[in-house]
Image (cartoon, rainbow, N blue to C red):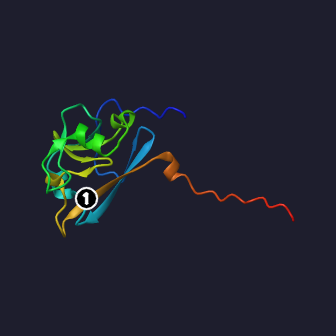
Amino acid sequence: VGRRPPIPAVPLTWHGEAELAWGGDRLSFVATVGSGISRRLLGADAVCLRTRMGGEGLQPDPRRPRRALRKLLQEAGVPPWERDRLPLLCCGERVAWVAGLGVDVAFACAPGEGGVVVTVQRPAERAPAVELESSQEPG
């Protein structure tokens, strides 16, 4: 298995682009209504993508309290070697979204509100499908 490209060493500022490269992966930002991250709240402060620094928290479920990102990633079964590669979308100093975990409730889009859904595509997921012909011997 080959090594994956490095993650940006400094936070990557997001200015509303539809796609951004992230360590060999591609992040897609799709405009929605009533789902994803609130566009209004994203516009309130500088938005950047970065990796974990330690001590971050996230509350992806409104019925549960805010929890340490480290614990949430462990419970989600994210392998240790992937945790430090995951993109975190931050608005100012606050984590708004984490790949594989979702949107923090403080940044969640309300029904009818303009939002942004972020998805991560790995290179294998972007590659076009190839159909292989089966070789059948005459019988």
> Residue at position x 27%, y 58% from top?
116
Q: Nearer the viewer, residue 17 or 80?
A: 80
* Image-based side of 74 in relation to 105, left or right: right
Quarter occupied by residue 128 = bottom right
Q: Which quarter of the rendering shows the C terminus?
A: bottom right
Q: Is residue 21 above or below residue 116?
A: above
Q: Position of residue 113 (x, y in %)?
A: 18, 66
Taking depth in this image into account, of 128 and 42 the one nearest to the observer is: 128
Q: Three-letter amino acid code at disc 1?
A: Gly
Q: Find the residue positioned furthest to the right.
A: 139
Q: Of 130 and 113, which appears nearest the observer?
A: 130
Q: Dot 1, crowdedness within 10 Å: few (<14), some or many (≥20)? A: many
Q: Position of residue 2 (x, y in %)?
A: 54, 33
Give the quadrant of the N terminus.
top right
**In the rendering, at what x and y percent does residue 94 appear?**
16, 42
| Image point (31%, 46%), residue name | 76
Q: Which image quadrant is residue 32 in?
A: bottom left
Give the left or right position of residue 74, taking residue 64 as reference.
right
How many badges with numbers are in the image?
1
Please tell me which residue is depicted at 63% across the width and 57% down the height of the picture: 130
Looking at this rendering, what residue extends furthest in the bottom direction? 112
Q: Position of residue 52 (x, y in %)?
A: 27, 34
State the SS at label 1.
Answer: loop
Q: Quadrant of residue 135?
A: bottom right
To which residue does mark 1 refer? 36
